[in-house]
Amino acid sequence: MVQKINNKKSFSLKFDLLTGLSPGAISKKRLLSDMKGMYYDKDAYEKIVVEKDAVVYEFYDLNINPNPENLSFGTTILYPGKVGDEYYMTKGHFHDELNTAEIYYCLRGFGYLLMEDQQGRTEIQEFKPSISVYVPPGFAHRSINTSNDEPLITFFVYRADAGHDYKTIEEKGFRKLIIEKGGQPTIIDNPKWNIQKTRR
Ligand code: PAN
Ligand code: ZN
């Protein structure tokens, strides 16, 4: 949406349960080429991005006035796929307003929400249809689609002024990764996690 949404008026928006898409809003798309440096297998990434620059996920960033009294919401549609043995995932971020929480609700598909705070505590919650997940304030969060053939569709709500800090994760990554091992989602230590760089 181009115009700022007037938070003094009610409105409704459809999100399709099958596709996760909204006919009333414009989604932001993230392609493989937007994910440079995020997957741990650099060679697999370079190869796949040249073959086909697929859409990894799309999501809604409604233009809600960024005030603490407002809420922003939408869906994320994370497509199935892998780079090497690492599942398609969102970039992941801390909120600029670090002490703001978020709620996710899984509409379709299977996967995980990986969370990590600045002290290095990791939290992982499973996504499956009808499950809601609470992201505590201070935790970076990344969605991961572990299905072979189905999109992972989640609905999210967060404080409209939360803001998104992508830089920290782009530079350091998450401490843990979820990859496919022996046909199963498996949590591993991120071999590329960069301990040198600190947030802000
Ligand atoms: C979500 C995310 C969305 C896309 O709306 O922004 O799933 O993931 P990235 O922002 O990490 O690319 C959210 O957590 N908002 O705060
Ligand atoms: Zn968030």
Image (spheres, grey):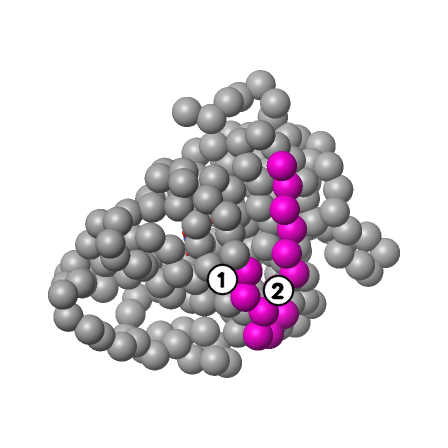
Q: Would you say the residues marked 2 and 1 are in contact, meaning their CB atoms lie under 8 Å apart? A: yes
Q: Residue at x 22, y 50 (%)?
A: 67
Local secondary structure at mark 2: strand
Image coordinates for residue 104, horizontal then vertical, percent: 49, 62
What's drawn in magenta, residue-wise?
A: 121-133
Image coordinates for residue 119, horizontal then vertical, percent: 58, 30
Q: Is residue 198 left or right of residue 67?
A: right
| CB of mark 1 near ligand 1 (< 8 Å) | yes
Instruction: Say which quadrant the N terminus sits in.
Output: bottom left
Q: Residue at x 41, y 24 (%)?
A: 200
Q: Residue at x 62, y 37 (%)?
A: 121
Q: Which residue is mark 1?
A: 104
Q: Is residue 148 left or right of residue 88?
A: right
Q: What label sits on residue 127 in the rendered view?
A: 2
Q: Where is 41 relative to 7, above or below?
A: above
Question: Amino acid under label 2?
Answer: Phe
Name the residue nearer the viewer: 42 or 196.
Answer: 196
Is residue 173 on the magenta stretch? no
Q: Quick one: label 1, few (<14), some, or many (20+) residues within 10 Å?
A: many
Image coordinates for residue 149, horizontal then vertical, percent: 65, 71
Q: Alpha-carbon distance for marks 2 and 1?
A: 9 Å
- Specify the farthest residue to the right: 182
Looking at the magenta stretch, what is its main secondary structure? Answer: strand
Question: Amino acid under label 1?
Answer: Tyr
- Specify the farthest residue to the top: 196
Q: Where is 163 relative to 105, above or below?
A: above
Is residue 196 in view from this perspective?
Answer: yes
